[in-house]
Amino acid sequence: MHFVYTVWMMVVGLWVANDASAKPDSWSEGQKAVGTSSMLTATEPFAVDIPTDVASLVTKPTAVYYFSPTCPHCQAVIGEIIELSVSFPDVQWVGVASAHSSPDMIEAFRQAYAVEFPIIHDAEGLFSQSVGARATPNVYVFSPVEMDSSDQVDTESQPTQEGFATVSLTDMYLPYARGYAGLFKLRNGDAANPFAHFQGYQGNRVCMSCHVEEGKSYLMTHHAQAYYTLYKVDKVDDPKCVSCHVVGMGEETGFQLGDHTSPLVGVGCESCHSASGGHDGEAVDAKESCVGCHDAEHSIHFSVEKGLPHIDHYMASGLTDEEIKARVEAIAEGTAEKPLLSFPKGETVGSERCLSCHENIHPKDPHRDSLHSLKRKERKDPACLECHSTPKEISTMVSKADHTVEHYWNKEGVGCESCHGAGGEHVANPSKENIVGLGDSCPVCVLESMCTSCHTPKWDPTWNLDERIKIYSQD
Ligand code: HEC
Ligand code: HEC
Ligand code: HEC
Ligand code: HEC
Ligand code: HEC
Ligand code: HEC
Ligand code: HEC
Ligand code: HEC
């Protein structure tokens, strides 16, 4: 699945981005971002010989955008690169088009994206050989060699080849992906004042480049795939849906509707930690962010205490790459557990009691007879009862694995409390506070998941929420 691949590459990308950085000795598993400055040194600068047509343009720190005009990823990032070239004058830009390109293609690319910086055609592939480029789009940052500096580059031992000149390679992105702009500014800006350029939303990639542990764990949460969820129900372009499934929609530097490759898709770091994660001096309490999205309509009986353990920033600690990948895939496939769907704990009382007050409710409810569909023997089989009956006590809706026949009411099909939660307290003292009323629930966000915990593809291959829900909407 393409999406899993993308998320997985972000996991790997964390390490790619960090391989290029000199990690301090003090870095250890499970620690917060220590040694900010070390993250700002992308690589120990080292000397490379590159073709003179490129080297002659390296008159100050210069970023080389190595690309192919027809490669979709190169097209996807050029907007961000142009923006960077304008907004961050500390570094100048040069394009180098790969050997595969033709002059016509390069010209078309320049015009289509209004590229103002010079583009050189690496017709012989000499540039790509000199830096060992294997793919596009890459970005390399060079500086002129400083012969007099103390960390002087040794150019004497190997005389420079004809047609080549020595420059110092100070930073690189292999490949460059959308969302690296903030990191680029951090690494190539004022080292004494690293967050000077943090204004507005940065995107997860930037945060994860320093907060590595938090990043890995984050990718194991449902939040990381919240935009993909909208793809699955074909709602990525619906403004009513997108706002809670992305970062900062409606704000100037936030997510823009329809920008499907944006680094701000999904519920990201800055959805909870605010733009720039407080590094712009405006920190917020992340625990207060939840209810902005997990409101009564979009989460059953949500509380911060219930949610926090499932977004633990260190849950990836000690896990192998394989284990992390399996979790990422399970979320994408929809097989990962959804702990928020669980009702509050409590004992059930059975539908008879409920009907004594709510006699006319859901008159066509097909669930009441669901025990009758089972044969005598099957009525003693917890593997059938878990979907055809109501548990005597509700702890969670999802993990039913340990149940025996004793856990279920033997006269009750799928009763009221399978959908509204345990009603012991409510029966004694009826109020809206002690029962899960579903009337306000967003059908796609909450009801679909609840219904499909039983209406699985195996038992209900033609499941369709809009069709099935009708019975409940009637009065
Ligand atoms: C250049 C490295 C770097 C980047 C990039 C970065 N951070 Fe940080 N962040 C740090 C450091 C260092 C600290 C201080 C850690 C500490 O106190 O132990 C910190 C602290 C924090 C804290 C506060 C932790 C606390 O204990 O109060 C939060 C929240 C945070 N960062 C979120 C973010 C978010 C969100 C982003 C992306 C927009 C981000 N950071 C980007 C280095 C970075
Ligand atoms: C920007 C909106 C937003 C914010 C803020 C937010 N969430 Fe979520 N959350 C979502 C969305 C959307 C999903 C569903 C993701 C999916 O599966 O596609 C979700 C899913 C979850 C899930 C997993 C779903 C499940 O059924 O178990 C947990 C747990 C969770 N959120 C906890 C929290 C907590 C705790 C906070 C605050 C610290 C929080 N969320 C803040 C939007 C948000
Ligand atoms: C107010 C914020 C908000 C809005 C608006 C919103 N959602 Fe959600 N959505 C959430 C939250 C929070 C969850 C997680 C619910 C939970 O597990 O408790 C969620 C979960 C989902 C899920 C289930 C994910 C899963 O894996 O179980 C789907 C599907 C979904 N939303 C689609 C939509 C669609 C379609 C719309 C537009 C009609 C929409 N959302 C509008 C906040 C929102
Ligand atoms: C769903 C909301 C949510 C998301 C998404 C989220 N965080 Fe957090 N984060 C929190 C909460 C809640 C805390 C705990 C705050 C507290 O205890 O006061 C926290 C704590 C932190 C801290 C400080 C303590 C620690 O354990 O490290 C850092 C740093 C941090 N988050 C960075 C990040 C980064 C980086 C990302 C994205 C990769 C991210 N967070 C995504 C909610 C979130
Ligand atoms: C003694 C009478 C009585 C019994 C028994 C009873 N209810 Fe209620 N129920 C009420 C009343 C009254 C309300 C309206 C409360 C309000 O509006 O404040 C209500 C409201 C509800 C609501 C709507 C909550 C909302 O948010 O709108 C649901 C759902 C519900 N009951 C389900 C049940 C279930 C399930 C049972 C059985 C476990 C049950 N009721 C048993 C009297 C009862
Ligand atoms: C606890 C498991 C469970 C849950 C939760 C559940 N169902 Fe069912 N549902 C069943 C079973 C079992 C049957 C088969 C009943 C029978 O034996 O005749 C069924 C049958 C149905 C039927 C009639 C048969 C059909 O396919 O048309 C409809 C409609 C239906 N359910 C809708 C829903 C909706 C809507 C939801 C969510 C609001 C939901 N169900 C939640 C278990 C469940
Ligand atoms: C994961 C939930 C689940 C489990 C477990 C489950 N069922 Fe069902 N079953 C359903 C649902 C949902 C339906 C309704 C399908 C529909 O009508 O679309 C159903 C329908 C049926 C029907 C057809 C009812 C009718 O009138 O059409 C029979 C018979 C049945 N189940 C028997 C069993 C037996 C026997 C077992 C145990 C071996 C079992 N089920 C386990 C969810 C489940
Ligand atoms: C299969 C799941 C399911 C079962 C079983 C079920 N309900 Fe409901 N109930 C719903 C849904 C979904 C709604 C919201 C319908 C709507 O307004 O769109 C609802 C709404 C309600 C309401 C109105 C809430 C409001 O805000 O107006 C009451 C009261 C209620 N149910 C009581 C019961 C009782 C009593 C039973 C058992 C006899 C029962 N329900 C069985 C799914 C279920």
Image (tube, rainbow, N blue to C red):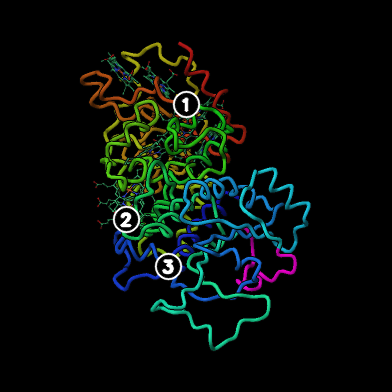
Given the image, on which type of amino acid does mark 2 rest? Asn
Q: CA distance from mark 1 to mark 2?
A: 48 Å
Between residues 23 and 130, which one lies in front from this camera angle?
A: 130
Which residue appears at 33% of the width and 63% of the height? Answer: 37
Between residues 8 and 249, which one lies in front from this camera angle?
A: 249
Does residue 131 appear anywhere in the picture? yes
Given the image, on which type of amino acid does mark 3 rest? Ser
The boundaries of the magenta stretch are 122-137
Between residues 396 and 8, which one lies in front from this camera angle?
A: 8
Q: Is residue 73 above or below residue 370?
A: below
- Going from N to C along the chain, the mark reached first, 3 or 2, is 3
Does ligand 1 reach within 8 Å of label 3's beta carbon? Answer: no
Percent position (x, y) of residue 253? 44, 37
- Indicate which label's residue lies in the foreground, 3 or 2: 2
- Going from N to C along the chain, the mark reached first, 1 or 3, is 3
Label 2 element class: loop
Given the image, on which type of amino acid does mark 1 rest? Pro
Residue carrying label 3: 21
Residue carrying label 1: 443
Label 1 element class: helix
- Indicate which label's residue lies in the foreground, 1 or 2: 2
Residue contact between numbered discs 3 and 2, judged by CB atoms under 8 Å: no
Between residues 414 and 44, which one lies in front from this camera angle?
A: 44
